[in-house]
Image: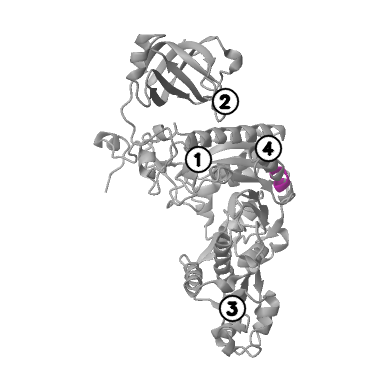
């Protein structure tokens, strides 16, 4: 027997018991006559002690132990001496006087300290991830991840969802992101791909009559990396039959609330039920399709108030179908010129050609813009409700560009004034997204979400005349400025699906080649259906207040999509490449 207890179990009620523990040497302290060791396992710490007067052999063994040695000990539980208890440990009132000790494995000196949470270079941490997981931060993140997924599974089961696994090797049907390709040995020149998501498979499960499906699904996308992306990631995937948008949102809101009530007891949920904004409202008021509603600071549309002004830039933008948007920052007059320039450069990185601004001083408004305005900016001030001490940033551009630029300044100012409280959870639904986007590079419409998303019924006539104005039956769930879930009601009629493929520039022949299995299934009586996918890595990252999703994944890739621990991707032997019927250029 390697252990009778784990390293967080023993209490004062176990005094005088003889026990066996196994674990790693966490810390070693030599107090002259006595040697103390904190023994660690996944569950916690227990202090063990050797006394040369009790057992000289064990004392000599303890003297040779070093950090991260794996040992097994047997001894008697006793009270810690007066004044030596540790209230920070569940085992802090007891210790074990060691009778026997066995070294199960020695350890070389680790590349970083395991027994503290000092910052360590991330490359080193990823290279030695098996050691990093021994540390408290990573261990707790993975345990919390397990707990989160366990709760989600139970709640889905309570809502009559059935967990069904779908294939990892599937047919390539490009849906937006670049796919990982797997060559087939048995069929030379043919390939599988790794799924971007189980999208078509879960729709086929609805055709199959499964009614409510879910899966903790592995997904793969060959994309450029950033803090909230990985080449392989995990999502909670759902699909439901005989539902509309509100059915899907209500069910998911109920599950999400229960999970966070159990997992985020130290945080406050701002509004229940979750607010709902259309995409137009979210962009227009907050400059984002995933708005952070922990603070107000809304963007105002001042187009009507300045349309009569003889300012060439405003007039040209309005004539081109653009808008004039303004963002008032309370107490922003104190910004230095350098800080203002930083905000302007931030706006430019999101497509704005530039920004105007108006500072509300004790002497009145000050701005180079005033010389172009007939009313000294009175209409702008009234529309934004600006007061002395405020600053107003103004963007003149197409709707999305102007809103996005000011939205980024809004977030930066939220950070500047510490308005984004990490202990507040602000959820909101965003609905009625555009169904299609026009790609200037490809000179055609592309799906804003994916090609299986259903249009709003009232917009169906626009598919032929103005496809860019069609709204989708799509919905995203945002949390504190991050998108954490997204889904839609799907097309379930083959005629409408073919019409959407045509608008996307997919010929009937190409549609049959790529999506024939789905179109065929729809001919056998597909129910109305819709679903959603949660970004589990991203949600757990937010729950744990971590800066990126690598901190909540056991073995992630780095920001260049490399596995620093194993060295992947690596070259393969020539004979294996030949066997797969592929050539390296």
The residue at the point 53 percent across, 43 percent down is 537
Tag 4 residue: 212
Circle 1 SS class: helix
Image x and y of residue 470, in percent: 65, 63
Among the two numbered marks 3 and 1 on one chain, the one whose residue lies closer to the N terminus: 3
Give the mark count.
Answer: 4
291 w.r.t. 544: above or below: below
Mark 3 in CB contact with mark 2 (< 8 angstroms): no
Q: Nearer the viewer, mark 3 or mark 1?
A: 3
Frontmost residue, 55 versus 169: 55
The span shown in magenta is 248-252
Image x and y of residue 18, in percent: 51, 9
Among the two numbered marks 2 and 4 on one chain, the one whose residue lies closer to the N terminus: 2
Tag 2 residue: 90
Tag 3 residue: 359
Tag 1 residue: 552
The residue at the point 66 percent across, 72 percent down is 300
Q: Is residue 251 magenta?
A: yes
Determine the CA span between mark 3 and mark 1.
43 Å
Circle 3 SS class: strand
């Amino acid at each position: 027997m390697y252990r009778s207890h784990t390293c967080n179990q023993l209490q004062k009620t176990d005094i005088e018991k003889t026990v066996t523990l196994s674990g790693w040497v966490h810390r070693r302290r030599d107090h002259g006559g006595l040697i103390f060791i904190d023994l660690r396992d996944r569950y916690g710490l227990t202090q063990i002690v050797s006394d040369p007067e009790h057992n000289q052999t064990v004392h000599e063994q303890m003297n040779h132990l070093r950090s991260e040695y794996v040992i097994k000990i047997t001894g008697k539980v006793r009270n810690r001496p007066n004044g030596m208890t540790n209230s920070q440990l569940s085992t802090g009132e007891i210790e074990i006087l060691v009778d026997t000790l066995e070294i199960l494995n020695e350890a070389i000196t680790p590349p970083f300290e395991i027994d503290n949470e000092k910052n360590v270079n991330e490359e080193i941490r990823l290279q030695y991830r098996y050691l990093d997981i021994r540390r408290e931060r990573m261990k707790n993140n993975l345990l919390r991840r397990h707990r989160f997924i366990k709760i989600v599974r139970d709640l889905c089961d309570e809502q009559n969802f059935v967990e069904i696994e779908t294939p990892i090797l599937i047919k390539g049907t490009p849906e937006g992101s670049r796919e990982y390709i797997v060559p087939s040995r048995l069929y030379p020149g043919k390939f599988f791909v790794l799924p971007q998501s189980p999208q078509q498979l879960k729709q086929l499960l609805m055709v199959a009559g499964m009614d409510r499906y879910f899966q903790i699904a592995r997904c793969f996308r060959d994309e450029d990396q950033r803090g909230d992306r990985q080449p392989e990631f995990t999502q909670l995937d759902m699909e439901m039959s005989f539902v509309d948008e509100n059915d899907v949102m209500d069910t998911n809101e109920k599950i999400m609330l229960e999970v966070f009530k159990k997992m985020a007891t130290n945080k406050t949920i701002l509004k229940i039920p979750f607010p709902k904004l259309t995409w137009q409202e979210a962009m227009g008021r907050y400059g984002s399709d995933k708005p952070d509603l922990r603070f107000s600071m809304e963007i105002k549309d001042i187009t009507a108030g300045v349309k009569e002004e003889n300012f060439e830039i405003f007039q040209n933008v309005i004539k081109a179908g653009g808008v004039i948007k303004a963002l008032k920052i309370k107490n922003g007059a104190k910004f230095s010129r350098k800080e203002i320039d930083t905000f302007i450069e931030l706006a430019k990185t999101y497509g704005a050609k530039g920004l105007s601004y108006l500072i509300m001083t004790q002497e009145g408004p000050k701005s180079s813009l005033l010389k172009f305005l007939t009313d000294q900016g009175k209409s702008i001030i009234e529309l934004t409700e600006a007061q002395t001490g405020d600053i107003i940033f103004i963007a003149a551009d197409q709707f999305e560009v102007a809103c996005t630029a000011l939205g980024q300044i809004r977030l930066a100012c939220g950070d500047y004034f510490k308005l984004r409280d990490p202990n507040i959870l602000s959820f909101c639904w965003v609905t009625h997204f555009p169904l299609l986007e026009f790609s200037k590079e490809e000179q055609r419409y592309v799906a804003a979400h994916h090609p299986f998303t259903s249009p709003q019924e009232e917009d169906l006539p626009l598919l032929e005349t103005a496809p860019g104005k069609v709204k989708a039956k799509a919905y995203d769930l945002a949390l504190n400025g991050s998108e954490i879930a997204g889904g839609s009601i799907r097309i379930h009629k083959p005629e409408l699906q073919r019409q959407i493929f045509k608008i996307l520039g997919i010929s009937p022949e190409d549609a049959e080649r790529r999506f024939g299995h789905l179109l065929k299934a729809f001919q056998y009586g597909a129910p109305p259906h819709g679903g959603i996918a949660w970004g589990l890595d991203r949600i757990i990252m937010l729950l744990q207040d971590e800066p990126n999703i690598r901190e909540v994944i056991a073995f992630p890739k780095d920001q260049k999509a490399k596995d620093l621990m194993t060295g992947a991707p690596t070259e393969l032997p020539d004979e294996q490449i030949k066997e797969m019927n592929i050539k390296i250029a």
